Image (cartoon, rainbow, N blue to C red):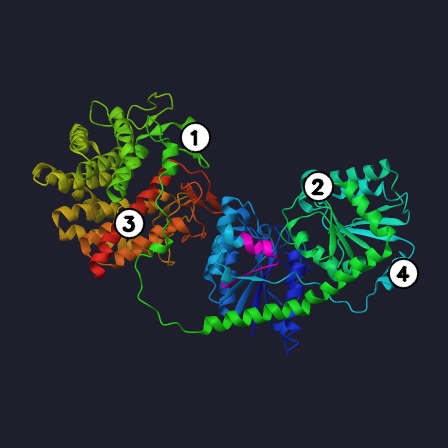
């Protein structure tokens, strides 16, 4: 059995790299083939600027440049085509590229071997992106490994990861059998000193000043005390504040006349040297300033070396130091720390008891033992993956993954004028005011929601959005689009797109009006705009208007004039298509731009009314072409607005917009209604899953906390603003899937 490992790796100076290297050696120590490390596949992460600076050992077969997305995809290909039976990923947000390391998700989704992930950080209060990443990794991975019971609890309760997927394996510690406390103290000339040690990258949250302040109450009784602060300053601190914190600590030492009792060793030491210092010290202190640390490798090392450990009660320390393996003191409480130090220095037996209990526990977490736990887990996962399961009946729509329909965010965005078009995160951005596009979409969504759920909140929204549309209609039948928060018009005439979307909403209102007065009002507004239809030249304005007319005709099928109008507008689109199509480009324009699916969607709507087979043929042909561009990867990948996709040019992948997904969902549903081909329902549901993480970055855009939808998919993550357009696009897509369930059950019977 061969394993691929993903993480940082020596000679990069990084705790995760040291862990990965130790884990590999520990697993190898449990196999008969001690040369297997030569055949191990390590995929190493490089820091920006380090690409050519590190000389890796032979087991590193592939490197990933942290901020290069393509490297992650190529790494997945390498692992898949290697002879690896499984992949172990060491996860820490900061070592992967994109926002909070989001670039790792597309790689993991492409792996064809079982995945095991070790989380070195599990946050109690993650950001939206961090929670999204952990949840998605939990969905992909066969097992998640954490190092504390607190981490298990967090994964279950915060990230919804099933308990059966989670394994607790503690942080391993080295085994240097030749080291003894007395021998190493002599090597470092510490025989006459009581050595207190703190190790790690220096930063403000380490709380070193707490120990220095405590020493002022210790050195008078115990002048032999020497406090060693071992480690460089954290690179991020150096970049933003230089050595400000170290200088502050040095001044504090001078202020208290502790120059003979405090020593700063500013260096990055090897693991072997670190373990010597840990073995040589009498007391190890971690004076961190807050509880939010789920794992501390150095704390585990101190226990493994048999040091008497004192610590503030951060999460990992509370667990590891229980049962008398160490002693805790309160955050920033130097007086309490001084009292404990004096107590154990005054009583050698207490000091030795702490050291002995730590050492005995440390023997249980030596790396070879931890390696055996990992090897057993990987073996179990590989065997599980080899078991062939007889597939059951495939559900075209998996209702278990669909969130509960909620209008909370729409309620936040809606006031008595209409729906506010933008938001900062989940908070309405009143500075941007309102637009016709969003209020028309909101009217459509509210009508669909009331039809589906009979939700009284949706019913209350309808007159608000309809009133906005009425207010924005001009005397010539067109519509203004934008209005400020103080109800001032911001344009004289809106776009043809906004006009068409409004006609769509009004037509749907006539078709699905909750009462007669709404239908009559919609018919009046629709009729006022009829004269504007012939002015339309934008193909998307025409397409949206065709959809609106098709719904109008479901309400008033006897209106032959309107049937002819729809046919003539449909002919405009089919003529444009005939002019632009080529053998390798079956599309209406020489570019795939925005809201593309709306064009074949309008043809399917037209054909539903007229039954015109030639229109259906073009609708199906252009749908197939759009699919070939956006669904060739097995999930929906919308054409990005950062450059679009010109014929003969490069296709932009980002920024992907939610309205394109909504149009695609609607397209496949309408295609099913016309053709009765259930494959369209399957594609509709796959498109909807774009909102829930089946996308280029494998990131959810739907926010389960705010019940809004993020504004787009960018190359580094999601746009966290949750405006009306994206949220309405999600909700309309959601309601479309619910409506499709009625049809699905029909043909499954």
Viewer-side residue, 451 vs 108 = 451
- Earlier residue among tags 4 and 1: 4
For residue 181, which numbered disc appears in the image? none
CA separation, marks 4 and 1? 67 Å
Horizontal side, residue 308 vs residue 518: left or right:
right
Label 1 neighbour load within 10 Å: few <14, some 14-19, many 20+: some
For residue 186, which numbered disc appears in the image? 4
Asked if residue 699 is among those painted magenta in the image, a careful observer would answer no
Q: Which residue is mark 3?
A: 738
- Earlier residue among tags 3 and 4: 4
Q: Position of residue 267 (x, y in %)?
A: 77, 51
Viewer-side residue, 688 vs 715 = 688
Q: What residue is at 75 percent from the left and 59 percent from the top?
A: 270
For residue 429, which numbered disc appears in the image? 1
Region rendered in magenta: 142-154
Horizontal side, residue 155 vs residue 286: left or right:
left
Where disc 3 sits, the SS reads helix
- Earlier residue among tags 4 and 2: 4
**Do tag 1 and tag 2 residues touch (Cβ < 8 Å)?**
no
Position of the C terminus, as image quadrant, is bottom left
Label 4 neighbour load within 10 Å: few <14, some 14-19, many 20+: few
CA separation, marks 1 and 2? 36 Å
């Amino acid at each position: 059995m061969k394993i691929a490992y993903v993480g940082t790796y020596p000679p990069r100076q990084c705790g995760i790299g040291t862990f990965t290297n130790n884990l590999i050696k520990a697993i190898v120590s449990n196999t008969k083939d001690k040369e297997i490390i030569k055949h191990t596949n390590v995929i190493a992460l490089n820091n920006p600027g380090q690409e050519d600076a590190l000389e890796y050992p032979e087991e590193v077969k592939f490197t990933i440049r942290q901020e290069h997305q393509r490297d992650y995809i190529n790494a997945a290909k390498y692992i898949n085509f290697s002879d690896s039976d499984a992949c172990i990923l060491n996860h820490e947000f900061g070592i992967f590229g994109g926002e909070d390391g989001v670039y790792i998700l597309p790689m993991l989704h492409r792996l064809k071997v079982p995945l095991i992930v070790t989380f070195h950080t599990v946050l109690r209060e993650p950001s939206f992106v961090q929670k999204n990443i952990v949840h998605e990794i939990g969905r992909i991975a066969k097992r998640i490994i954490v190092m504390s019971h607190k981490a298990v609890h967090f994964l279950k309760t915060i990230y919804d990861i099933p308990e059966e997927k989670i394994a607790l394996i503690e942080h391993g510690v080295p085994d240097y059998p030749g080291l003894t406390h007395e021998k190493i103290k002599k090597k470092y000339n510490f025989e006459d000193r009581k050595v207190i040690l703190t190790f790690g990258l220096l930063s403000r949250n380490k709380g070193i000043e707490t120990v220095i302040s405590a020493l002022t109450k210790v050195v008078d009784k115990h002048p032999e005390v020497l406090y060693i602060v071992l480690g460089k300053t954290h690179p991020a601190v150096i970049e933003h504040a230089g050595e400000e914190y170290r200088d502050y600590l040095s001044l504090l030492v001078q202020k208290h006349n502790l120059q003979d009792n405090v020593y700063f060793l500013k260096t990055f030491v090897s693991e072997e040297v670190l373990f010597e210092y840990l073995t040589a010290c009498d007391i190890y202190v971690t004076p961190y300033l807050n509880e939010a640390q789920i794992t501390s490798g150095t704390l585990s090392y101190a226990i493994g070396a048999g040091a008497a450990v004192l610590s503030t009660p951060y999460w990992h320390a509370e667990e590891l130091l229980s049962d008398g393996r160490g002693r805790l003191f309160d955050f920033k409480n130097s007086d309490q720390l001084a009292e404990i130090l004096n107590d154990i220095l005054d009583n050698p037996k207490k000091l030795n008891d702490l050291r002995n209990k730590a050492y005995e526990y440390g023997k249980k977490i030596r790396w070879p033992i931890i390696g055996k736990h990992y090897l057993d887990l990987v073996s179990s996962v590989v065997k599980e993956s080899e078991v062939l399961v007889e597939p059951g009946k495939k559900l075209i729509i998996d209702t278990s993954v669909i969130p509960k329909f909620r209008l909370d965010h729409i309620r936040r965005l809606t006031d008595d004028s209409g729906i506010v078009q933008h938001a900062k995160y989940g908070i309405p951005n009143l500075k941007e005011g309102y637009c016709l596009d969003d209020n028309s979409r909101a009217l459509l969504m509210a009508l669909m929601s009331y039809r589906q759920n009979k939700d009284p909140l949706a019913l209350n929204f309808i007159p608000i959005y309809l009133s906005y549309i009425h207010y924005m209609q001009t005397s010539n039948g067109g519509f203004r689009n934008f209005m400020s928060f103080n109800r001032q018009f911001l344009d004289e005439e809106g776009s043809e797109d906004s006009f068409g979307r409004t006609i769509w909403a009004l037509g749907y209102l006539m078709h699905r009006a909750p009462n007669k007065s709404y239908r009559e009002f919609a018919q009046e507004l629709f009729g006022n705009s009829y004269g504007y239809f012939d002015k339309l030249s934008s193909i998307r304005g025409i397409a949206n208007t065709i959809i609106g007319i098709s719904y109008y005709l479901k309400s008033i099928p006897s209106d032959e004039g309107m049937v002819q109008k729809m046919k003539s507008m449909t002919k405009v689109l089919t003529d444009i298509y005939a002019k632009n199509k080529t053998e390798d480009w079956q599309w209406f324009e020489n570019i795939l731009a925005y809201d593309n699916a709306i064009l074949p969607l309008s043809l399917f709507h037209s054909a539903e009314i007229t039954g015109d087979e030639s229109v259906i043929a073009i609708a199906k042909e252009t749908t197939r072409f759009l699919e070939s561009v956006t669904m060739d990867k097995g999930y929906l990948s919308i054409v990005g607005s950062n450059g679009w996709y010109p014929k003969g040019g490069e296709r932009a992948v980002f920024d992907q917009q939610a309205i394109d997904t909504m149009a695609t969902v609607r397209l496949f549903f309408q295609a099913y209604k016309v053709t009765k081909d259930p494959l369209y329902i399957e594609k509709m549901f796959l498109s909807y899953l774009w909102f829930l993480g089946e996308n280029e970055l494998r990131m959810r855009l739907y926010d389960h906390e705010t019940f809004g939808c993020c504004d787009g998919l960018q190359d580094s993550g999601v746009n966290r603003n949750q405006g009306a357009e994206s949220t309405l696009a999600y909700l309309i897509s959601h309601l479309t899937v619910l409506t499709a369930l009625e049809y699905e059950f029909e043909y499954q019977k």
